[in-house]
Every structure is written in structure tokens, then in C-alpha cells.
Amino acid sequence: MNSRWGFEEDDAKLWDQAANDLNDPKHAVGPLTLDGANDVTGLGQRMGIDATYEQARAKVEQLLGEGQEYLGRLADTLLAVAADYEAREHASESSFKQKDVEGN
């Protein structure tokens, strides 16, 4: 697909790259867990720090994953819009050519 302006494909590539750029941080957050009483100088579990930290860590991981998904959808949507635009432009061009051949 190569639209007249090409900006749709270029924009889609940018959004797709943005989605890919979230992959490394998302995977880096995954293993950053606390393992209980030995964390945070042994007070983590008793003070609830480990549970609070885990909630925050899991939320960051979730949001990064959602960001990847949404940015990927945006890229796909831009490509679909470009394809639709190309198809409509081609159909209109064909219609005009057909009318010209028919002498209308």
C-alpha cells in the first residue's frame, strides 16, 4: 500500500515503534518482585511494604502492556484507514475513467 501522501504509513510506523519501545520496560518490571521478610531490611512483610510495592509493580507492568496494545491498535487503525482511502481513491478514479470512455 502506498497512498498518495504516505503519511498514514509513516505515522503507523511511528506508533508501532512506540508500542515496541514499551516492550523492554515491561519485561524489566516483571522480575522486580520482593520475596518477603528478607526484603527492605526484613521489615517489608511486617509493615506491608512488600504488598504495596507488588501492587504498584504489577500496575506498572499492566499499564505498560496496555500501552503496547493501544499503540499497536492505533498503528493498525492508521494502516486500515490508509487502505480504505486507497481503495476509495482507486474506485473513484476507475469510475471517472469509465464515464470518460462512455462519453459522459
Image: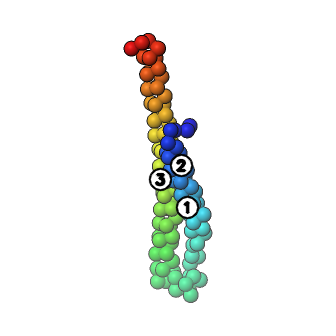
Q: Which residue is mark 2?
A: 10
x%, y% of residue 88?
A: 45, 30
Per the model, the C-alpha gap separating discs 2 and 1 is 19 Å
Image quadrant containing the N terminus: top right
Q: What is the number of callouts on the image? A: 3
Label 3 element class: helix
Relative vertical location of residue 21 with respect to residue 91 in this rendering, above or below: below
x%, y% of residue 65?
A: 52, 58
Label 2 element class: helix
Q: Which residue is mark 1?
A: 22
- Please name the residue shown 51% across and 70% down the image: 57
Q: Could you tell me if the residues under marks 2 and 1 are in contact, i.e. CB atoms within 8 Å?
A: no
Which of pointers 3 and 1 lies earlier in the amino acid sequence? 1
Q: Which residue is mark 3?
A: 70
Question: Colour scheme in the image?
Answer: rainbow
Q: Nearer the viewer, residue 96 or 103?
A: 103
- Please name the residue shown 60% across and 63% down the image: 24
| Callout 3 amino acid | Tyr
- Please name the residue shown 58% across and 72% down the image: 32
| Callout 2 amino acid | Asp
